Structures are given as C-alpha cells and as structure tokens.
Image (cartoon, rainbow, N blue to C red):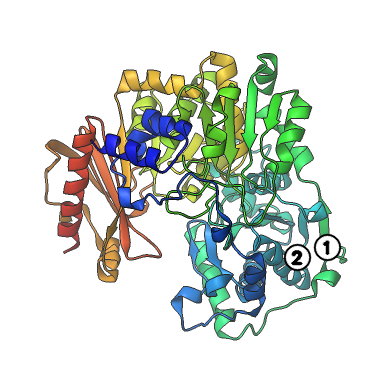
Amino acid sequence: MVVLVLADLMFRRNIAHQTLQLFILDSIHFIYFLKLMSIHELAGQPAPKSILVNVNDLEKNYYEQKPDPENPTQLVVFGTSGHRGTSLDGSFTESHILAIAQAVCDYRSQQGYTGKLYLGKDTHFLSGPAQKTALEVFAANNVEVVFQADDGFTPTPVISWAILQHNKPNTQHNQNRQNNYQNLLKGNENSLADGVIITPSHNPPSDGGIKYNCPNGGPADTDVTGWIQTQANHYLKSNLKGIQRIAYEKSVALPHIQTIDFSEDYIADLENIVDLQAIAERKIRIGVDPLGGAGNAYWQPIAERYRLDLTVVNQAIDPTFSFMSVDHDGKIRMDCSSPYAMRGLVALKDQFDIAFANDPDTDRHGIVVPSVGLMNPNHYLAVAIQYLFTHRPNWAKGIGVGKTLVSSGIIDRVVSDLRLQLVEVPVGFKWFVDGLYNSNIGFGGEESAGASFLRKNGQVWSTDKDGIILNLLAAEILAKTQLDPGQIYREIEQRFGQSFYTRIDQATTPEQKSAFKKLTPDKVLADRLAGDPITAKLTTASGNGASIGGLKVVSTEGWFAARPSGTENIYKIYAESFKSKEHLNNIVAEAKKIVDAALC
C-alpha cells in the first residue's frame, strides 16, 4: 500500500518515469518507510529561480557577519567532515576561516610539520573566498602551500592522493604494514605534508565547509579536530587576536605559495588502481555528470588518456547549481545518491552502458545502470566488495573489509561468503584511514556512497573517499563480467536474501541526546526484536572497539542502530530486515521503544 500511494504521489507531482522506475526497482528497499510528508512538491523537478541562492548575499555576509562567541551555533564545530555552515546565519564567515586556518598552523607547528600543505576547494560559492582567506593566513605563517593553478577546483580524493605521494618516500620500503603510519611520524617529520580541503560536500549551494587531512592523507581523527576546534574558538572569543595574515595579492606572490595542476599525475596513476584498458577494449559507453563539481575538469582528460568512450553530459559550473533537480525536501542538494537530485542522469540511463555522477568535492559516487537505474549505495558497496576480492590477485591474503555499522547487513553476508574478515566501525570515514594506509583492509565504504580501496598491487591509493575510482570500478565490473552492477546485485540478493533498509529521524530532547553517551548494552532489557532472538547489543563497534555514540541491536533476521544528531534535537534510526517490509516496520516501532526505555 505504501508503494502504491507513493507511486501515485510521484506521478501527480510529475516526477520522471525513470525516477519512479529506479525508486521501485532498487531504492524501495533502501528508502522504504520514508515519511510521505517529507517529499516536497518540487522534489525531482528542475530548480525554479525562486529557490536559487543569491551569491551576492553570500559574499556580503561572509565578509561582514561577525560570529557571536556566546552563540554556540556560531562557533567552530568540527563534525565527522569538518566545520560546515553558511554565511547567511553567521556560521561560516571570514572570521571562522581566519580562526581555523591559524589553528591549523598552530597544530602543524606543535607537531613539527613543516612540509607542504596541499590546499583544495570545490565549486560551492563560499569555497572561493574561504580559500583566499586561508591562503592569507598560511602565507603569513610561512606554510608552504600548493594549490590548483588558475584558481581551479580540486577533488577531495586528489588532495589525499597528493599527500600520500609526497610522504611516500618515508614508507615505500617499509615492510611492516602494521606500523607504517607510526614509522612515518617517527621518521622525517620536517618533510611531512598534510592538507586542507574547503568543501561542504553535497550540501546546498548556500553552505561552506573546511576540513583538515593529516599526513596519512585521511580525515583528521577527533583528537586532532578537537584540538583545532578549541584553538579556533579561542581566536573567535579573543576577537581574532594573534592571527597572522598577509593580503591575498601579496600572499600569492610569495615563493612558498605555489600553484600546480593536480590532475595530470593523478590521472596518470589511475591505471594502477582500475583496469582502464579493459573498459576501453570493451568499448563501454559511459555517461558522466559531475553535478557541477570539482571533478568536472578530470573526466574528459581521463577519457582522452585512456581512450574511453565517455561523454560528460553536463559541464556546467554554476555556484547556484541552477541545473540541478530539487531534492526530496525542496532544497538544491548535489547528492549523487538521491533519486531526486539525480533525475537528469537517470533519464539518460538507456543511452549508455553505464553512467555515474559525483558530488561537488568528488568524494562520493552515484552509479546509474540500465537494469535498475540509480543504484542504492549499499547495493553497490556489496557488488564492489564481491568483485574486488575476486579480481585483485595481488592483494595480500587476510586483509579485511571495512564497513560502517549502519551499512547494510547484505555486506556482512557477502564478506562471510568470501571468508574475509569484516571490520565494522562507527560512522565516519576517518575510521578506515589506518586500515587503508597500512593495507590491513582492502576496501572501506560508507552507506552514504563514499568509499576507497587499494591499488592493484595491494598498496594504499587514498585514505579519503574517492568517487572517481568507485565510478570507474563500476565500468570495469561491466567490462570484465559483461553484467552491470545492478544485475550482479540481483544475483547477490538471490543468494543471500532480500534486504529492506530505512533511515528515519525521531524527535528527542537535549537531555536524551546527552544520555546516548552513557548507554551500555545492559540497559537493553529486551531479548527479542520484532519476534526474532537478539544476538548482539552494542555501544561500541565490533571492528575497532570505538564508541558508536549510540546503540545497535542485532537479531537473527534484522537490526537497528540509533545515533543522536550533532546539530538537531533528533536521533537517527537505521534499520534493516531480511524478511519483509512489514518486518522492517516492526523493527522500527520496537527500536523506538527499546531506545526510549534504555535512555530512561
């Protein structure tokens, strides 16, 4: 009944047939139990002018708004992907970037890092002025900065790759895979590179973001981001006293501020992680939509170098992202895993053998195939894992598979069938960094369409999400198996069962959110979940023992996890059933009761 009502609603709102088709064929198991009221009347339609952001207002507020240090919403807050906000409400301004950039300089000084800092930005409007502000601070602190020539854009994975390439001489001859990063830090500290990426990822056009990547190439862990956050807020509360700065025009003329073209070397290295020759020989017809992001300048050179039959269907760079289809909530959001935002590319699915997209900083992937349309991210992760671990003969035996604890259990079943070690970690790609760096895991992936994997020779490629290689891998899978990833997932589903998955938001109070931190497994008194025996009650991740910041309960036929939001008075419930939609419904209903009882 829910499917029929939703289908009728989508037709009434003139959503493309292709979007409806992909929703029912693939995404229904992922988004089932979606609240109908959350689907905006503009969802899936071209963005009207009335909702486009005014970039003049963004710029004016970026420079003129001064954050109130007594207002928690206007302080620096590093979440799982750095500090994010918008100049329109004073949460992402010049003052924030001055404070964060100086804090990064202070941290580098404390750690003894005097090597290059690789700086990148995406195509959000606020990324431009933020990069200029950061450069002014880095230049004044004598940091050797390398950034994209011609004021261009740089994908997040390219910064991670560049950091690792710079630091590679310290580790390339080290045979102790368990201690590579520790040896790196104990080695030639003075030459260590790190990076800063200015991006709010797939967030709306009004947003800005900034994050710090460590010498291991990956997102900084909480001890690092906590230090930077505290130091940055100290500067905000001190009226920016102590921040060093040189005017931008003078900064870029200094010898320690350098520009390069990141793309050439990165693109040349791609053949060492994906079988591009197989894709070319099979003449796979590929469609690409960069969604107006930093990857826009990469795809045509990739096609030319490797002789791929690849068409970039949208080459627009527009800070308002006016070419986008509206997302489920009526906002413009460059989310390549959303059937609403991806309507344009999905409509072209039958023109290509495979098509894909990325978000603005190119760390996420969206795979579109003729068989199912836009693939559910969980489904593609399962396919990628099964393929990689059966087609990479030079990977070391015994390496594991990394997944976040809210990713689909279908991945667990695939990993078990392959007799591999599953490394389940809390939400956040930072938890995969050490495993990828040390080649202890061959693949690390998140349910939110972010992943990376090792080179063909089993060595590290990137320690941040890389949407380019995940997209190209989909084409390799098609070339080598003659089946698109959607068809392969159907085979997986036939073997391991059908998955019904959802994520919903549940209202809560600040007191209950705080109580999540004190949860212990013994506070869950239930012994059955939706009629099935409970097999695990978790407040720490099984793969690394780290706190999950919430609760996960597993039964023989399903599971749920609950985590509080960092910015809203809600907690998120993730749930999955291997029985039916009705069983999933029961899991969600019981999850609310179990969580409420445990928080009392």
- For the residue pair 570 and 76, the one nearer the viewer reads as 570
Residue drawn 52% across the image and 82% down it: 68
Q: Where residue 402 sits: x, y (%)?
A: 44, 38
Residue drawn 14% across the image and 58% down it: 597
Residue drawn 58% across the image and 57% down it: 49
Q: Image quadrant of residue 26?
A: top left
Residue drawn 68% across the image and 55% down it: 121
Judging by the rendered image, the residue that carries numbered circle 1 is 256
- For the residue pair 102 and 320, the one nearer the viewer reads as 320
Against 586, residue 104 (above or below) is below
Judging by the rendered image, the residue that carries numbered circle 2 is 143
Q: Where residue 404 sits: x, y (%)?
A: 40, 43
Q: Is residue 394 visible?
A: no
Whichever of labels 2 and 1 marks the residue nearer the N terminus, that label is: 2
Q: Image quadrant of residue 109?
A: bottom right
SS at mark 1 in the image:
loop
**Residue type of the residue flagged with mark 1:** His
Viewport quadrant of the C terminus: bottom left
CB atoms at circles 2 and 1 under 8 Å apart?
Answer: yes
Q: Where residue 187 sits: x, y (%)?
A: 67, 52
Q: Where residue 36 sits: x, y (%)?
A: 31, 48
Viewport quadrant of the N terminus: top left
**Residue type of the residue flagged with mark 2:** Val
